[in-house]
Image (cartoon, rainbow, N blue to C red):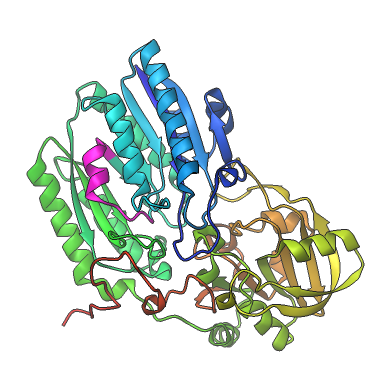
Amino acid sequence: MRIAVGGISHETSSFSVKKTTLADFTTGFGLFRGPEILQRFTDTNICTGGFIDGAKRHGFELVPLLWAFAYPSGLIEREDYERLKQELLDRLREVDAIDRIDGVLLDLHGAMVVDGILDGDGDLLESVRRQVGPNVPIVATFDLHGNHTQRRVDAATTIVGFDTYPHIDMAERGREAADLIVRTIRGQINPVMAFRSIPLFWNTPTQVTAKPPMNELMQRVHEMEQHPGVLSITVATGFPWADVPDVGASVIVVGDGDDQIAQSTADALSTWIWDHRELWHCPPMSVRDAIQQGEEGGNYPIVLADHADNTGGGSPGDSTEILRTFVEQDLSDALLLYIVDPQVAQQAYAAGVGCNIDVDVGGKSAAVQGPPVRMQAEVMAISDGDFTYDGPMYAGLTGNMGRSAWLRQRGVSVVVVTKAEQPLGPAFAKTLGIDCRAMKYIGVKSAAHFRASFEPFAGVMINVDAQAIQTHDFKQLRFQNRTRPMFPVEIGPPQ
């Protein structure tokens, strides 16, 4: 049994001014071809790592094609996307000509938008389907934050989405996908899919699967997956900052040969989600209110999630409201991870450890990110940016922040970096000599992924809607391609 594996993955923020190019796919987790994919992702907690585990378990040959991942940012340049897609298809054609492949496993995201192609994931799936024909199974894994479409459901044999947020189950979902494709090839199951799109903007804090209300929903999902004739259920919370017609939440149910069971299950679950739509909305909280709330509780460190400038969702990472508030309140043991400011990072790097520098930090990408913060800071440490992830998410992989520095003014510290990557944990801060556990206030450019690593020592974690490009006040977003009214913008709560 020969199963091809590959993927082009990107979470695209239509409101980001930074276009995504081929060069962006070669940095970070990078661009890998052929056997490089197996070498890079064996024993890692991503879906492709799970595909590799599945190949070992079931004894099939995994035929690697092309794997490309760019950190979230703006629209992908059309020419660069087409080059990547064509290379993946060419490699698929070549391996299929040598010896017919039996199936395809794709590691995708679900919120990829290309300049001129609003449904990037659907376009890629359709292209692979045309290449292999109607009878070869295609199983695709997707992030929880996909904006799914009927186009994708029609092109794939099976879709498997993440169950957790933070995403700590990626390899597990890869193994599930491998199991499903093997059983399909062997004729043990006959997957059919039902799809329901839900006109719902889902706030990030209510998506965290370890606590209410999301844990109740996922318990319901897992119970429904045990029903006869149901193989898998995906709930996607959507990605509101991709300006596409099908933006929003959705449910995909994979049934075993019975369209009616699949559709009735999808209808029941999507109706329950919609009827409880108020659970998935929470009013934005200001930075100052969050600090006050944390101090009243008295549990430290107080971790503020700057979700409107989440670099993991495509924001520039240089909004300044949290840093400005830390400085204006003259807080002690306060730390911000990270501000993306290559100019300041280079200035600190050139000055060296122990030097004092006058710098304007952040606020350089767009006016909505706020003005720069003037600091007279000491350079505490510098780095070329290399580190290894040590938390449950992306375990076993390495990252690079580019030239970076730890700056401190009185009791306020900030890590300035060159590359936009969200702080999934304290790993990079440790390389600079920072002990996050000793801090009283920590700001992170993240929405929820930080929780898996920070929760063991955080006193309290609070999402804040600081001034930034990816506000969770959805009424402020200026859509051009959204085609339907959404809760909570045009549609109100249940009566």
Magenta stretch contains residue 147: yes
Residue drawn at the location 32% of the way across and 71% of the way down: 280
The foreground one among 220 and 167 is 167
Residue drawn at the location 21% of the way across and 68% of the way down: 274
For the C terminus, which image quadrant? bottom left
Residue drawn at the location 42% of the way across and 50% of the way down: 114
**Would residue 130 appear left or right of 258 to someone viewing this image?**
right
For the N terminus, which image quadrant? top left
The number of callouts visible is 0
Residue 146 rendering spot, x and y as whole percentages:
36, 54
Q: Residue furthest right?
A: 354
Residue drawn at the location 23% of the way across and 77% of the way down: 491
**Vertical position of residue 325 compared to residue 178: above or below:** below
Q: Residue furthest left?
A: 260
Residue 177 rendering spot, x and y as whole percentages:
34, 35
The foreground one among 267 and 308 is 308
Span highlighted in magenta in the image: 145-158
**Vertical position of residue 149 compared to residue 200: above or below:** above
**Would residue 390 appear left or right of 220 to someone viewing this image?**
right
Quadrant of res 130? top left
Magenta stretch contains residue 152: yes
**Would residue 408 appear left or right of 214 to someone viewing this image?**
right
The foreground one among 421 and 450 is 421
Can residue 27 be seen here? Answer: yes
Residue 218 rendering spot, x and y as whole percentages:
31, 57
Can residue 58 be seen here? Answer: no
